[in-house]
Image (tube, grey):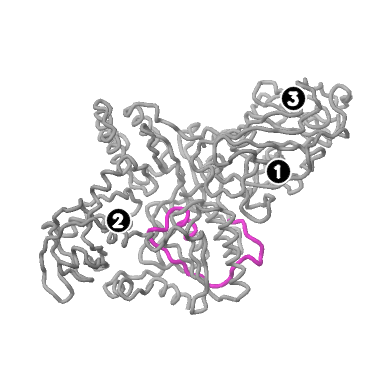
Amino acid sequence: MRPQGPALVLAALAAAVLGCSSLGSGADNPTSPPVGPTAVNESGFPAAEIQNEEGGPVIVTGQVVYTNPFFTAGVAEPVVILEDQAGFVDRDRNFLIPVESQVLGQITSDFFESPFTYSLNMPVEPSGTLRDVDHDGQSDTGVMVYAVAYWTNAFGDPYLERRDQYGGGWSSAYASTRVSDDRDNYLEVFGGSYLVYAPDNRQGFPSGFGADGRLFTDDDPIVALPPGWTLVNLDSDLFVFDRSRRPQIELYEPEGAALVDFSGMSYTEAFDAMLEKFRTEYAFTAYKGIDWEALSSAFRPRFEQAEQRRDSNAYALALRDFLWSVPDAHVGMDLTPLYGMVYDEISGGLGLSIRELDDGRVLAAFVLDGGPAEEAGIAFGAQILELNGQPIEDVLDANVPWSSPFSTETAHRLEQLRFALRFPVEADVRVTYRNPGGTPTTTTLVAAPEFDSFDFTDPFSATTGFELPVEFYVLDSGYGYVSIYSFFDNQILTVQLWERMIQAFNDSDVPGLVIDLRSNSGGSGFLADQMAAYFFEDELVLGNTGYYDDSIGDFFFDPGDENTFFLPRQDLRYRGDVTLIIGPSCVSACEFFAYDMTLQDRATIVGEYPTAGAGGSVEDFLMPDDISVRFTIGRAVDAQGEIHIEGVGVVPDVRVPVTEQNLRAIFLEGRDVVLEQAIEALE
């Protein structure tokens, strides 16, 4: 998955909405500046009508409701902060929240259970950015404008640095403000609340949005604020100014980030709603030539029939088949309701795994000791000619793997090779084969309850599940080796391991580095991009991601959302030679890391096959029977605006051939011939 793009969607799908630290305390303080009717208004503007005059906020509390399933993914240091809004006042997308203005709140309940609560002590005298917002043509001291916002910290110390802030700007999700994602009003605040600090009684502040509907513009009506803190509610035509000492402020999950839930609908209603969602929001309709009306005609009758019969299994199968008709590795569903069927269909094996060579032959790559194939005399390297009287090529072509769908034919074929030899237990299977140096032989095998042969071809078979997200060491050749297993793990841990690796290899003058991405199913695209930045000297533009905008009825790419390298400090950059090992199990964010490393020819890409070709951002939604469905909503493009990952993947510069010789080297001799080629490329 590649969670990035417009700030609303990026904040929610990546579940990584920044982080920071605090200054000051908000304890009750008798030395606070005079407030309320005792303070004389010297601004020349009419005084704001104050509700609950108690001297201004001292402690702010509230809750954060989230429904997006990615909200907590990878989050290690979630924080709620008082966020300087000078970036929005100036409409400066590159505004960096100053360290001195960052005030850290406390999360006061379980962050991993929605809603969670927070508390924030207001500083007596904040150190934020002053902005004159009264538009009276005179230069005034101005006010400090803050939102309360959720962020997460991943880089450096607890304060928000540039990378934590995604390059700068202002919060557009999970904040006290409501922010638009419509193209014509993109990232404009249209509601919610601000906390405003006036240093004296001479400062004005808008009391409404004005005729243009936008805040902090020349047509805003202006009122005078009392000194100190005031809570400004933006959700009415005339803003409400509140001076309560302990206000409650909710942080909003934007509509575009909230989990869409069709689970309360009938099967047919939910299909119609799902189809409309795909028709409008799916990122690659034209690119893949998908005809949604044809799919509606093909599948809607199955949903109608399942509804009429109240047949939940038929409904789940119809949903599965609809999703499998979309050739996209990011599209899929929770298969739990069909696990019984899955098990029945694939629990029997022949003790045999196969690989297809570049020359088209299909050979036995694994023969289980004591399994049906070995007992029948099938040897390693045997050419499989037929199954049940059909040519093996026809069997493979007809196979529909339970791991469907796929973005590339390469990934599809590898999974067909896995699933073609799975059968119900005790099924009779006629196999025609030719052992090395032998003649064609036909034998009947009985499928046994074994998964060893199936697990052998699992692309993640070499992993245990206990790997750290980043693991590294020095090879016998003197080159460094690092395997990145995930961009979806604890982000702070991932970054710390990554930087430790860079420092260790730099300190030891390691001349070259092999980066292994063969077992990486993706995660945060932003994290992947910024980890690649450690190998570069320029802040390159990497691309952009467009999302459907219902205000224009089309996909919208905002120039301010371009993906860019934010470089680490000089001593954390690796300048040696790099080779990158890839394969079809390098998916989504992993592929964007690999693509980044092709820029400026920074790395040589080595592998037997391209990456998975899953090049977009995803959204999950709920269907009846609480089945979760995932599909691609973000259309990722390169710096030239071209689709570059989806359906293609990253292709090796040095392709390791799939030959009988290499098959024997890998599976009989235990050699990693792809790693050998990567080392050779360094040399």
Q: Can residue 183 be seen in this view?
A: no
> Which of the labelled discs sits on residue 280, or is there none?
none
Label pair 1/3, CB-CB below 8 angstroms: no
- Of the numbered discs 2 and 3, the one sitting upstream in the chain is 3
Q: Mark 2 points at which residue?
A: 415
Q: Mark 1 points at which residue?
A: 104
Give the percent coordinates (x, y) of residue 603.
49, 67
Between 321 and 635, which is closer to the camera in this rendering? 321
Between 418 and 544, which is closer to the camera in this rendering? 418
Measure the C-alpha gap from mark 1 to mark 3.
22 Å
Give the percent coordinates (x, y) of residue 42.
88, 26
Label pair 2/1, CB-CB below 8 angstroms: no
Identity of the residue drawn at 30% across and 56% down: 415
Amino acid type at circle 2 is: Glu
User: Which residues are drawn in magenta?
Assistant: 565-594
Quadrant in the rendering for residue 445? bottom left
